[in-house]
Amino acid sequence: MKNLVIVESPSKSKTIEKYLGKDYKVVSSKGHIRDLAIKGKDGLGVDVENNFEPTYVVSKDKKEVVKELKKDAKKAEKVFLATDPDREGEAISWHLAQELGLDINDDNRIVFNEITKSAVIKALDNPRKIDMGLVKSQETRRILDRIIGFKLSKLLQVKIKSKSAGRVQSIALRMICDRENEINAFIPEEYWTFKALFKENKKEFEAVLTKIDGKKAKIENEETANEIESRIQDEFELVDVTKTVKKRSARLPFITSTLQQEASSKLSFGAKKTMMIAQMLYEGIDIGNETQGLITYMRTDSTRLSNEFIASAYNVIENEYGKEYKGFYRVKNDENSQDAHEAIRPTNIENTPEKVKPYLTNDQYKLYKFIYYRALASLMADAKFENTTYTFDNNGLTFSSNGSVQIFDGYLKAYKDYDNSKDVNLPLLEKGQIINKIALNKEQHFTEPPLRYTEAKLIKALEEEGVGRPSTYATIIDTIINRGYVELKKATDTSKTKFFFPTEQGILTDQKLKDYFLSVINVKYTAEMEKELDEIAMNKSDNVAALRDFYNRFVPLLDDAYKNMEKKEAEKTGEKCPECGNDLVYRQSRYGKFISCSNYPECKFTKNINDKPKEEPEHTGLICPECGSELLKRKSRYGNYFYGCSNYPKCKHIENIDGEKPNFRRRKKKAE
């Protein structure tokens, strides 16, 4: 073996190995191989007093993996680190280099935005050094999350029985709780509307009351509505006809957040499911003659497209639709965008959805088709519509009627399956014409409170606030649901859309965080921290200074909370302790809910809750990093949740909700 290439995913390694010759061996690290130790002061694995120096250990489930990697690395003349092209991937490459004894000053890091033969070969021809700015940024994020996760979670467990808190998950919970507070405080206001119905040239259309004596129509009660109704006569005079041609531009190609939002609204895919399918499309699909990645890297916040893709897409547009359908390339990245790599697009424009459909599952096909035509449409010409507005006068009351007719489909030629707009045809009328109404609708309404967040709307809100990063949104949502802080459910039995509702425990958790940690657990501070992490990645900011600033703010707040936050009283079962006669209460341990005496520790009586039915494994849509099967959400015999491979017992991979190895209690072997 001359060359060793290390990637993260087993399925990715199989795809890439087919591209390279016999001089290459491609193996997988199966994700992260190391994490912060759970030792030292407070079990942080971080020496706070020594410039936040971290201590890393190889994860227990990765010891054999690392052992095999070391064997392969010793045999190889050259080792290439080909983990994902983002901060997390850069950090994994650094950890690999540390464990395998590689020189981080060597050009041994290769990156590619798509898994195709040409992209992989090009990356091998252009290796670089590990980007330590990206590594420091990821490390800083991990230390921040460890400090908050350990210290704040422990406080909440002791005081209010909440399972955890996190730097970003708590902001998502805050948004959901704040929206619920807005809804509860909302006072509806009454208003009335009028619509006149007409029929002309066999076409029915309506006009809406927009002005009263030249001022915007605002009818707040029935008395005023009755006065307006008494003024309306049968004859309406058309006093103005306005025709304009308006253009509508295509949406930009997908980034991670917009893919999750649009897949939710158009395909009814949850964020987790969307990312799982996108991961499969990225890592490689066998399309008959070869295995190749069908889309570019799915964790990105840039709308940029490569010159090669633009050229090939224009060629398809011209040949398939005509020259008049070619549009202009546009790119728009917000101030928080890292622009590390391209937007999500097909790796090869010749791989049309119809061509690869036989090799895809139904869900894979739906998502690939959506990505394909979104990227193609972004380079197509604007759609054009002729908008017509009729303005009618009726005794000083102004009614307006609007129509819109498509006169050139433009990008909608390719994107029509994802567009809901419809033509509204008005009859041909002339200014000065008098027409009679055939009906008048007077309706009472009340203003509505703001809607609760859907999954798509929450992701959009987090993105707009600069909280979290594209790769974290699905995990954030999964965490606050699994912690029991929110429920994602339908508002009514007839509703098709699911909304986030905070639970009682979620509301309590958010309120305590507001009471004691508002200065560090808020949208502005969290977004500023994200910007600082970006600056660390670009070597423009010092990671130790960032950690020290946060720690010095956080610890006094923590001390105050321990001193002043009231403990939540345990819920009584309604039964008396059979040993001492005091009340029995429900308690929560790391192993689940149980019953014990309220007089603990004087009385140590406990018993299990036996009437709870066994929970069935829950589908998650996550992929097992070891064998590629689906991870199922299971409940251990100790009551805590974890992810286990559906291919058990052949594959024994497990991880907890946060992606770490669970610390399940194990029985000691009896002495022989």
Image: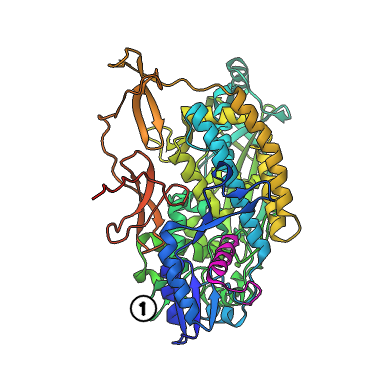
User: How many numbered markers are drawn?
Assistant: 1
Q: Does residue 525 appear left or right of residue 588 in this picture?
A: right
Residue in the image at 44% along x and 35% along y: 484
Q: Where's residue 650, x and y in %? A: 28, 61
Magenta stretch: includes residue 664: no
Image height of 650 relative to 18, above or below: above
Q: Residue at x 68, y 62 (%)?
A: 133
Residue at image mark 1: 288
What span is in magenta? 85-107
For residue 35, side relative to residue 46 (left or right): left
- Residue 31 visible in the displayed image: yes
The kind of secondary structure the magenta stretch mainly shows is helix
Specify how the rendered protein is coloured: rainbow
User: Where on the picture, by quarter, is residue 192?
Assistant: top right
Q: For the residue marked with disc 1, what is the amino acid? A: Gly
Report the front residue among 7 and 464: 7
For image coordinates 53% across by 32% down, the residue present is: 156
- The outermost residue toward the front is 672
Pick the front one: 605 or 374: 605
- Residue 275 coordinates in the image, percent (x, y): 47, 57
The outermost residue toward the top is: 581
Identify the element where label 1 is drawn: loop
